[in-house]
Image (cartoon, coloured by chain):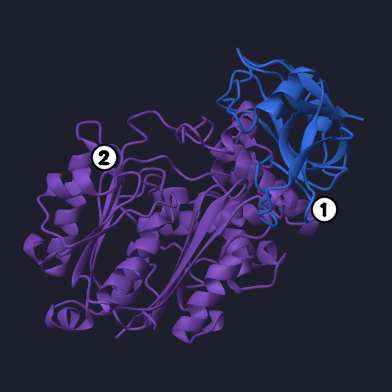
Chain colours: A blue, B purple
Amino acid sequence: MPYKDRKVPAPSVNAENKPYFDAASAGKLRVKYCADCKQYHHYPRSICPHCFSAKTEWRDAKGTGTVYTCSVLRRGVPEPYCIAYVTLDEGVSMLTNIVDCDLDAVKIGMKVKVTFKPTDGGPAVPMFTPA
Amino acid sequence: MTIKGKACIVGAYEHPTRKAEDKSVAQLHAEVARGALQDAGLRREDIDGYFCAGDAPGLGPMSMVDYLGLKVRHVDSTDTGGSSYLIHVAHAAQAIALGKCNVALITLAGRPRSEGSSGTQPRSWGANLPDAPFEAPYGIVTANSYAMVAARHMHEFGTTSEQLAWVKVAASHHAQHNPHAMLKEVVTVKEVLDSPVIADPLHRMDCCVVSDGGGALVLARPEIAKSLKRPVVRLLGAGEQPKGQAGGKLSLTTSGAAASGPRAFEEAGVRPADIQYASIYDSFTITVVVQLEDLGFCRKGEGGKFVADGNLISGSGKLPFNTDGGGLCNNHPANRGGMTKVIEAVRQLRGEAHPKVQVKNCGLALAQGTGGQLGTRHTSATLIFERV
């Protein structure tokens, strides 16, 4: 199943998540880090979901990771697409799409790297492609 | 303080419709409320507590209380998706135990089939959701959310599509005896595997039906229950547990049932091996496998083996489940399957299930719900009932 671009719904940007999507539009994947508990988290919050500290900060992610799970939705949509959780090298898993490859070849455990796709009237969002 | 033995289910009613083009959602709520009251032998005026979730039109319980003409002194509109109604049963028992109400009504109704909703479409959960900006762009829908759980379960434990198919096969064996079931035909493992793939690795027959309809329950304190001319079904234990992505520390192969189940068993003072009938939420076949493991009916990772070879079929299998045909074959009204899980457990305990699927001398039953999405965030709820 070859990959085809689809119309990606725009994320709703708010004051809390704007730095993440501004970075994505500039081609950077950012991840939140807590200076108190020294752990990353995703999706990003202003208050750490692990320890409830307010000392969270944006870090540039390496942009590489491993497919934790994936599924190609084949019915009821104009174009099949591959949804996945990717575990970043920083240790947190994020929901995403695997793109620009044979969708049938995407497997759990596959090494992937970040790429960015435009959305329908909003900022770009990070997606992943085989490394 | 415990809710053990503090409340009984005295009325249960499942709407016979599966497609309600000519009815309003509020009307369906009223029809199931009447049905459950009639089943209980109670009047509307006896109700002093009302419970509903997000399928009920209006802000919390207000519109429905007014529409139904209820005179209640206690309300609760906890919404955890499809498991809401199991949580309502537990919360109603708490309210009854505390003297906040004596007779509680719980209603569910919806028309997703008439309104064209399905498991491959995005659902709107409202603005300002913190998680949606990180999920909606990627096309998360009900089907691919659960499919990712199935894919990971297969990867970690070697679970197979054939094993998942057995869940549907067992449900279809039960549905053939239910005149109201949407899908009454018995299917084989091969037919499940030959049905089109919706979201890898889930086939169409791994997915529940989309149906209109609803259901209602009436709970009452034990003194009231004993005064009615119906078999007494008593609540013994309950548990509830939300679970999500844990800030990115993901574990998709375990559900909140791993916590809600043990709590319910402890409160009830029974063990999984004591359960004679189980209603297990079956939005998808994988949902059943994960919950059976988490509830302790088998070990983690062995759910596939447990459900295989007809082990869930009433009369021949070790654990008869979803004898109405479940969400996979019978009914999944309002895209929320928890209500019908409780109703079939009540039928079994009363001895009122279809004779072909009735568990002999069914004295102890479990109902299990999973609301939301196993692939993102969900809430599990467990109830254990006995026939008095």
Q: Identify the element where label 1 is drawn.
A: loop
Look at mark 1 in the image and give the residue it sits on: A38
Give the chain letter at badge 1.
A
Depth-wise, is mark 2 or mark 1 nearer the camera? 1
Left or right, B98 with reference to B271 = left
Q: Residues within 10 Å of mark 1 (few under 14, many from 20)?
A: few
Residue B6 appearing in the image: yes
Left or right, B319 with reference to B247 = left
Q: Which of A21 and B299 is in front in this view?
A: A21
- Residue B284 higher or lower than A74, as above or below: below
The percent coordinates of residue B364 (x first, y second) are 41, 80
Q: Which of B2 and B214 is in front in this view?
A: B2
The residue type indicated by label 1 comes to: Lys
Left or right, B81 with reference to A118 = left
Look at mark 2 in the image and give the residue it sits on: B58
Q: Nearer the viewer, residue B316 or B388?
A: B388
Q: Are marks 2 and 1 on the same chain?
A: no
The percent coordinates of residue B194 (x first, y second) are 63, 39
Q: Distance between the residues labelled 2 and 1?
A: 44 Å
The percent coordinates of residue B144 (x first, y second) are 62, 38
Give the chain letter at badge 2.
B
Residue B296: which disc? none
Q: In which quarter of the image is the N terminus of chain B?
A: bottom left
Q: Identify the element where label 2 is drawn.
A: loop
- Residue B336 higher or lower than B255, as above or below: above
The percent coordinates of residue B71 (x first, y second) are 10, 58
User: Of all residues shown, which one is farthest toward the top?
Assistant: A121
Residue at x 29% of width, y 53% of height: B52
User: Of all residues shown, which one is farthest toward the front?
Assistant: A55
Residue at x 31% of width, y 37% of height: B111
